[in-house]
Image (tube, helix red, strand yellow):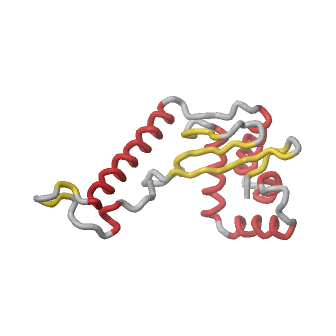
Amino acid sequence: MGKKKAAARGGVSKRTPSKGLSETGLEAVADDAYEQMEEAEAAAAIAGGGARTVNPELQKRLDLLAELSRRGDIRGFVRVFVPHDLTQDDTDYFAGELEGDETRWQQLAQEVQLIADGSKVLKIVGDQTTRAEFRYLMPNQALAIQREVVFYCENGDWRAEG
C-alpha cells in the first residue's frame, strides 16, 4: 500500500513476446502480490475483531485520550499525549497547530479513538509493557492507507513517541 508499482516507475511492457516477463514486469507482479497479501491480512485482522492492548494501564491512557478528543479538549489531550522530552514551547506550539487546523485535529482524534476501541487495529507490535506500535487503516479514507503510532512507557506513564 502506498508504494509505487514497478510498472508505474517507467518500465517496459510486462510481457514481451520473445522473453516472457521483463524485469520490470516481474517487479510489478511482485508488487501486486505483496499489496494483495497486505490487504488480505488487514481484512482478516478486522474481521477477527481487531486488536486491543492487553496492558490495562495503556488502555486507561488510550481511553483518556479518546475521551478528551471526543470532548474537543485539545490542550488536555496534548498534555497527556506528547512525549515527556518535548519542551513546553513545543507542546504549546503543537496544541496551537491543532487548534488552528480542524481537519488535522479531527484526523488525530479519530485515529486515537480507533486505537482505543481496537476493533479496527490490524496489529500491535511490541511487548505492550514498555512499547506498543499500533498498526491500523487510516479512518474515513477511500484508499486503504496503513498507519502506525507508537506509545512508550516511561516511569509508568504512557506517551506517544515523537
Q: Nearer the viewer, residue 37 or 22?
A: 22
**Residue at position x 66%, y 48% from top?**
112
Q: Residue furthest left?
A: 17
Q: Is residue 93 above or below residue 85?
A: below
Tell me where residue 152 appears, x and y as whole percent.
76, 47
Q: Nearer the viewer, residue 63 or 36?
A: 36
- Quadrant position of residue 55: top right
Q: Is residue 123 above or below residue 83?
A: above
Q: Is residue 113 left or right of residue 153?
A: left
**Residue at position x 73%, y 54% from top?**
161
**Residue at position x 50%, y 29% from top?**
48
Tell me where residue 46 appears, x and y as whole percent.
50, 35
Q: Nearer the viewer, residue 137 or 141?
A: 137
- Which of the image's four quarters has the C terminus? bottom right
Q: Is residue 54 above or below residue 72?
A: above
Q: Is residue 38 left or right of residue 147?
A: left
Tell me where residue 94 appears, x and y as whole percent.
75, 66
Q: Nearer the viewer, residue 47 or 17?
A: 17
Q: Residue furthest front?
A: 19
Circle count:
0
**Residue at position x 32%, y 65% from top?**
8
Tell me where residue 31 appears, x and y as whole percent.
36, 53
